[in-house]
Amino acid sequence: MDFLSPSRVRTACKGVAVRFLLTMMISLLITACSAMHDPFATRAAPLCTADTPWIDTDKAVHFFGTAFIGGVVSAYTSSFWAGLGAGIAVGAAREFWKIYIGSQCELSSSTLDVLGSLLGASLGAR
């Protein structure tokens, strides 16, 4: 029963988790590109705005939410990069969803998503 040893199962789960995260990031990128390039749509406003406050409850949710996701994924996979990618992917998905529904993404939210993911991934990978 060597094939069911804990280290082999853990390694297999990590591989599945990393493949899943890479697949999700690629699909988010494809969705974002298709949502941003609509030749028949005319937008009066830009896709993203920088005129939003940096300190707000929404920004705290972005920062701590992506820090939590990045920390959990990096602790589970023992990989800083997997945690960082997962946190950024979730934050980017939220901003792409805003664009898709006709709202504007916020540069401050995206920046806090990256910073939160960095913090969570670095703490989780220890």
Image (cartoon, grey):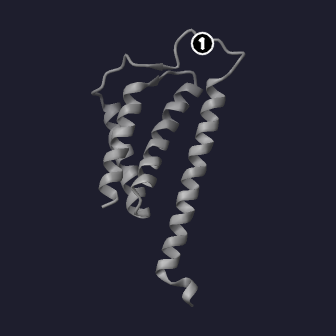
Q: Quadrant of residue 19?
A: bottom right
**Quadrant housing the N terminus:** bottom right
Q: Residue at x 45, y 42 (%)?
A: 88
**Residue linked to disc 1:** 43
In the picture shown, does residue 95 fall above or below 51? Answer: below
Q: Quadrant of residue 43?
A: top right
Q: Quadrant of residue 59?
A: top left
Q: Residue at x 39, y 50 (%)?
A: 70
Instruction: Identify the secondary structure beneath mark 1.
Output: loop
Instruction: Find residue 58 and report its horizontal and vertical position in percent.
Output: 35, 31
Q: Amino acid at mark 1?
A: Arg
Q: Residue at x 33, y 39 (%)?
A: 115
Instruction: Find residue 114 and report its horizontal and vertical position in percent.
Output: 38, 39
Instruction: Find residue 125 and report its horizontal and vertical position in percent.
Output: 34, 59
Left or right: where does residue 76 sit relative to residue 29? Answer: left
In the picture shown, does residue 9 fall above or below 113? Answer: below
